[in-house]
Image (cartoon, grey):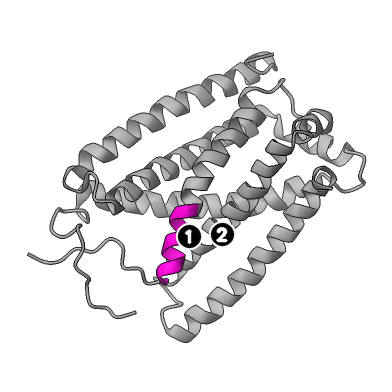
Amino acid sequence: MSGKPRETANVGVGLWKATGMWAWLLFRISGLILVFYLGAHIVIISTGQFGGDGETLNSLMKTFDHPVLVLLDLALVVAVLYHALNGVRIILMDFGIGVHRHKLLFWSAMAVVVICFAIFAWVAFTYIVTGEGVTS
Amino acid sequence: MKAEVVSTHRGGMWSWVFQRVTAVLLIVMLAIHLIFTHILNIGELNYDNIADRLAHAGLTAVDIILLAAGIYHALNGLRMVLMDYWFTSRTRALILTIVLWVVGIAFMAYGTWALWPWIS
């Protein structure tokens, strides 16, 4: 618990300036959103077992199929993808990979976020417009 | 040049290690969970098609690992954030850790209860 800065491979490459600082802040904000969502997800989805015949879950699912809530799901996907890919970047840097090119690493991770988001956006909009899944 | 430190390991070495182990588990398990639930599915979710998917032991296992890894990662992450603000002393941090373990075990029990029809 000492406050003395430890020598690490991260020394002096500017991780706490500009890109690195925003990456950290968004990581923290998306993390807090996901903690809140996970709690809500477990509590609400588990209530679907009340009654034991699945009717509770079915009525929950009807509520969640509203277009506004599908769009909120898509916002959640952004938080998940950002947190996941920035997390990959952090783990890579723990292994000393890309520390001196952390901006390039960050923007590469964001490119993966955009590609994955496009897939989920396609699924969500297909569902909103047609009411069908993309593989049905 | 001033030292800049990213991982200070304040929460303890094991908390740091498990945060990374659960991170990797979450990426794999969450990808499976989302692909099977929302991409390969048949439009609207309902109890019957969810039960059909969970009838495969592998997908129930994915959900249980996801539940455990997710709760650990979420609450340990929350702990790291809170320890930056108010739970800064050793005593406060310890109280926080104990409270979060109790909350985590309660969530794990509740989520496992909901998945029980497919576990048993």
| Residue under label 2 | B72
Nearer to us of marks 2 and 1 is 1
- Sequence-earlier tag: 2 or 1: 1
Question: Residue B35 shows which numbered tag?
Answer: none
- The verdict on residue B17 being magenta is yes
As measured in the structure, the alpha-carbon distance from the residue carrying label 2 to the one carrying label 1 is 8 Å
The percent coordinates of residue A16 (x first, y second) are 22, 56
**What is the crowding at mark 1: few (fewer than 14 residues within 10 Å), some, or many (at least 20)?**
some
Chain containing the residue with disc 2: B
**What is the crowding at mark 2: few (fewer than 14 residues within 10 Å), some, or many (at least 20)?**
many
The residue under label 2 is which amino acid type?
Answer: Tyr
Most foreground residue, B28 or A63: B28
- The verdict on residue A114 being magenta is no
- B74 up-or-down from A75: above or below: below
| Residue under label 1 | B18
The percent coordinates of residue B96 (x first, y second) are 54, 76
Say which element carries label 2. helix
Quarter occupied by the N terminus of chain B: bottom left
Task: Give the residue drawn at x 26%, y 53%.
Answer: A21
The residue lying furthest to the bottom in this view is B91
Which residues make up the magenta segment? B11-21
Task: Give the residue drawn at x 64%, y 42%.
Answer: B62
